[in-house]
Amino acid sequence: MAMNKQRGIGRRKILSTVASGTVAATAGCLTDAIIGDNSDDTRPALSDRTLRYGGVLPFSGGLGAVGEALENATTLPIAELEESDLDVSVEYEGVDSETTPTAAVNAVADLIDDGYPAVVGAAASGVTLQMTQQATIPAEVVTCSPASTSPTVGILNDRGFSFRTAPDDSMQAVVAAQLAVSEHDAETAATLYTAGDYGRQLSGAFSASFDGEVQRQVSFAGDSNSFAEPIAEALSDEPDILFLVGYMENGVDLLTDYYNGPAGDEVVFVSDGLQDDSIPQGVDATISDVYGTAPVSSGPGQDAFDQMYHNEYGTDPAVFTANSYDAAATILLANAAAGENDGLAIRSQMIEVTTGDGTEVLPGELTDGLELAAAGEPVRYRGASGEVEFDESGDGGSITYEYFRFTDDSVQSLSEHEPEGVAQ
């Protein structure tokens, strides 16, 4: 067995394992289900193939703080397979989206030119929208985003090539709006959001869901030197709730400008893009009354994933890491079922391997799942982030959300919620 991983942008991870009569102890007993008559199946054996997938992830830019964790989870299936004795080769290459559409389009073009048929990514919604429309859909390359939550992602004319394990933000907006009323008695609100599809859509969905008056919806540019002016505009009518939508790159400066400027008696609600301990730790002020919502892992494989991630990397998973593992695992299973590194063939299997009555495959059981899928047996992947059941729009994310608050130096979890009174 040999494995080589080059760190840095344009990284590559290659795994080859040696055939044996046994599989990893964590894989359970799924291989018993392989027994059957597959003599007419013409797909090649796993030992004769190399499964290939790429990653377009934010190692820099607005989401740079979580890029390494997302890639750790994206390549965790390779580490899982390395621990087994399955005769399979997997090749992975990750590139930097820089959390910008232009960089992502250019980066994924290199993966397309290198023949990668499927990609985990991108992360930011606006980046994913441009990357898929300009590059991957025309090239017939499958994408599966672990963190793009904009409703627009789910309504793309994508010819079936675009998937995501992240939930639709319209559901987060419902939860945030309901908590603003039930937990904080809010009757008025204003939104302050980062320019782009993610911020605009989440601001609009919150405003549509809020049971009260939304006084203002104000956008800000992520590359601003100061956020004092848009903050003052959003707070000019003294709302009960300020709903703040942004990325980690701006979180410290946003809240520092808020507390050093027009902060009043309002409660601040932040979105998932600002859920990170580094933000309250970096704010040069005493933090009070800052709450938020973010998707939380709730799948049947969550505990197994958490343990594998901690064992491999020595730290706990971060936001959207379970979604990243699920995206990679699903792509690998679909590739094995397709029998070739071809985007069209993989596309046709993405829904098949996450729905139906096939043998259930959980995180930690990927070895057996690949054997089953490669042998033509139906499988149903059940995820770490949630029940990954892709629909015709490519959506398959969990809709459970964590309600949290900022202390002076950390993010404190309070409870978990699902949207009430809406069709799911």
Image: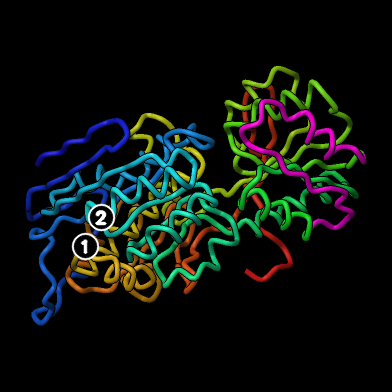
Q: Which residue is found at the position 23% from the left and 40% from the top?
A: 12
Q: Nearer the viewer, residue 110 or 42?
A: 110
Residue under numbered circle 2:
116
Q: Which residues are magenta?
A: 210-237
Q: Is residue 303 left or right of residue 379?
A: right
Residue at the top extreme, as displayed: 284
Q: Is residue 306 visible?
A: no
Q: Is residue 294 left or right of residue 96?
A: right
- The image quadrant that residue 272 belongs to is top right
Q: Nearer the viewer, residue 413 or 196?
A: 196
Q: Which residue is found at the position 75% from the left and 19% from the top?
A: 286
- The image quadrant that residue 260 belongs to is top right
Secondary structure of the residue carrying numbered label 1: loop
**Label ID, residue 407:** none
Residue at the bottom extreme, as displayed: 40
Q: Amino acid at mark 1?
A: Asn
Residue under numbered circle 1:
341
- The image quadrant that residue 312 belongs to is top left
Image quarter hosting the C terminus: bottom right
Q: Which residue is found at the position 54% from the left and 36% from the top?
A: 62
Residue 117: x, y in percent?
27, 59
Q: Mark 2 Cα within 10 Å, few/some/many (few <14, many 20+)?
A: many
Q: Amino acid at mark 2?
A: Tyr
Q: Nearer the viewer, residue 268 or 141?
A: 141
Please report contact status of discs 2 and 1: CB closer than 8 Å, yes or no: yes
Residue 290: x, y in percent?
74, 34
Magenta-span inclusion, residue 347: no
